[in-house]
Amino acid sequence: MVLGKGASSSLSKKMVDGAEEMVNNNNFTALVVDDDPLIRVLHDMYLRKFGLKAQVVENGKMAVDLFHVGATFNLILMDKEMPVMDGAEATKQLRAMGVNSMIVGVTSRDLSFEKEAFMEAGLDLCFEKPLTPEKISFILQELNKNNNN
Amino acid sequence: MIILFNISLTKGNSRAINRKGMAIDDHEHNSTRTKLPIIDVSYFTEKARMDMNRLQQEVACMRSSLFDQGYLDEQFIQLEELQDDANPNFVQEIVTLFYTDSARLIQNIEQALRSKPIGFSKLDDYMHQFKGSSSSIGAKKVTNQCALLREYCSAENGEGCISTFLQVKQEYAILRRKLEAYFEV
């Protein structure tokens, strides 16, 4: 299993069943949508460590535009609060376009009703920021299940 | 071609040698254009090793205290685990982004607190961002103060917001000072 050069063995210990198979498949791609450059760098690094090729954009409109020009991603990490177009609106538009990528909401809003509203926009999962190896491992497990179905 | 120098730091008995390793007399020695110092190389190797050990202990001690005193939490360890040979300065890069983010947010928050009346909704937005940013690098005390300030925002308690923000800035300044010293070493 390749996690990336010099990857810590502690990362591999945090992977759940199914995630390892996902990691070995180098064709999976991800899109990180977040206005915070720190989160973009952090989540991009996490995804690369888990073997995914990631692209990053800074708001929902840029994510939607990418799909308009034909880009596809297996996984989208979508922040909720963003300028220009927020995560909920971007998710709604992507679903309306017929995008069936796994969209995972990532928010620092810790109120359950806010998370619920975000989920209703069309998310598959929603996590509180920042993502951790355990959360990403879980996401990959779910992505793997969806891919097999 | 390897040129070996057999030289020592002792005074008196040592004789100078030329580049071929042959002892030279005083006349030849004094007539050379440059007079090289006589150096014991093993002394410096041992000194460098001791300095390195001391430095490593200092770094370990600083790192330990950041966690023991509650400035950093598990999230910082997650960042360290992402660092590798291909990205040797990853943690420092993330922390630098945090400084940039924080400087912008502190300025915005100060402006929001100066406005009359205080725009609590906008203030809460900024604090939400600051809390998110600080929790992303594991800045535990800063995150906790941000959470407290958000409670005062919800209650629209202006005085509580102002006094808590002073705490936020203080914790941020202390953390920044400690992290800068840590990365300096």
Image (cartoon, rainbow, N blue to C red):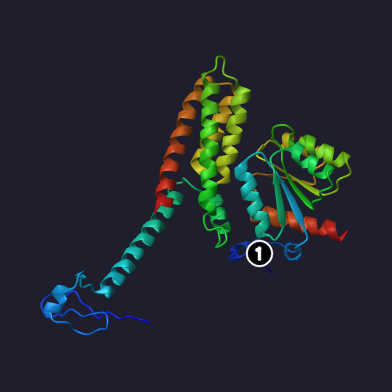
Q: Position of residue A63 (x, y in %)?
A: 76, 42
Residue B36 vertical position relative to residue B90 in the rendered view, above or below: below
> In the rendered structure, the residue with mark 1 lies on which chain?
A
Residue B92 vertical position relative to residue B146 in the rendered view, above or below: below
Q: Position of residue A105 (x, y in %)?
A: 73, 43
Q: Residue at x 56, y 50 (%)?
A: B75
Using the rendered view, name the quadrant where residue A110 is placed. Answer: top right
Residue B3 vertical position relative to residue A67 in the rendered view, above or below: below
Can you say which quadrant of the picture contains the N terminus of chain B? bottom left
Specify the farthest residue to the bottom.
Answer: B22
Specify the farthest residue to the top.
Answer: B116
Q: Position of residue B73 (x, y in %)?
A: 52, 49
Q: Nearer the viewer, residue B19 or A98?
A: B19
Using residue A82 as the reference point, say whether residue B166 is left or right of it. Answer: left
Q: Residue at x 52, y 55 (%)?
A: B89
Q: Name the residue type under label 1.
A: Leu
Using residue B137 as the reference point, say whether residue B49 is left or right of it. Answer: left
Q: Secondary structure at mark 1?
A: loop
Q: Residues within 10 Å of mark 1 (few under 14, many from 20)?
A: some
Q: Position of residue A41 (x, y in %)?
A: 62, 48
Can you say which quadrant of the picture contains the C terminus of chain B? bottom left
Q: Nearer the viewer, residue A116 or A62?
A: A62
Question: Label 1, on which residue?
Answer: A3
Q: Residue at x 47, y 26 (%)?
A: B163
Is residue B139 visible to us here?
Answer: no
Using the rendered view, name the quadrant where residue B50 is placed. Answer: bottom left
Q: Nearer the viewer, residue B27 or B75?
A: B27
